Amino acid sequence: MSTPAARPQTLVVIDMQRGFRDPASQWCVPRYDEIVPAIEALQERIGGSAVFTRFVPDPEEPGAWQAYYRRWHQMCQAADAPAWGITMAVPAGSPIVTKPTFSKWGPELEALVPLGGEMVLTGVATDCCILSTALGAVDAGRFVTVVSDGCAAVGDEAQAQTLALLDLLSPMVRIATSAELLAALPAKAPATA
């Protein structure tokens, strides 16, 4: 079995969108802005292009989604609504996966995270999209690292509970801080002129 340092790592930034940042939104994640520095530091050091994801509602609202959007009516917006814009800088060439589901795992991520590779998960919300994406990935044979200070939930209690739940899935899932991950990564070579 490969060690965490030997596995290819893919940074996946889940749903860093206006609809989850805006304090007036029904889906506001209170600590949204606090996790951005950890994500940016990892993005700079992991190398390669980070994968960004977007949640965009399905206009068909199939099955149970109809009831869900009756509860969260404000969030049933068109795919091009400002709420679904990514708030972080997305480098040119970075893949963006858009899905109308909590889990962002599927053929797109499967093609970007090699079997036996490690998906480093950051973003929002830990208790929803991070959790469901992690479960899909481990079912598909990928290792998952959830960056505890690089993701945020709807509240501190939900954050702690979800991280504790995910920790039960070790060694398929590990919980680490951005400092722990950065310390394990090789130093970035200085830019040459």
Image: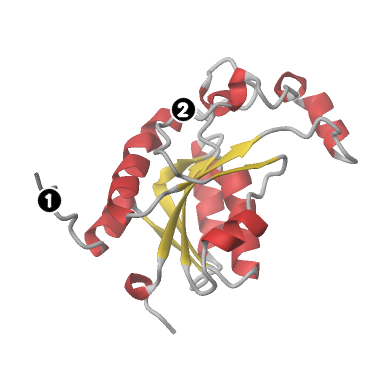
Residue that badge 2 annotates: 87
Q: Which mark is residue 34?
A: none
Residue lying at 37% horizontally and 71% vertically, measured from the top left: 4
CA–CA distance in space, label 2 to label 1: 28 Å
Residue lying at 33% horizontally and 49% vertically, measured from the top left: 42
In this image, 169 relative to 101: left or right?
Answer: left
Image vertical order of residue 77 relative to residue 126, above or below? above
Q: Residue 190 carries which label?
A: 1
In this image, 7 relative to 65: left or right?
Answer: left
Q: Regarding mark 2 in the picture, which secondary structure is present there?
A: loop
Residue most extreme to the left: 193
Residue most extreme to the top: 24
Rendering coords of residue 96 (x, y %): 55, 42
Answer few, some or many: residues within 10 Å of disc 2's Cα (few below 14, many 20 plus, some between 14 and 19). some
In this image, 32 relative to 34: left or right?
Answer: right
Discs 2/1, front: 1
Rendering coords of residue 44 (x, y %): 29, 46
Q: Regarding mark 1 in the picture, which secondary structure is present there?
A: loop
Which amino acid does the dot numbered 1 rest on? Pro
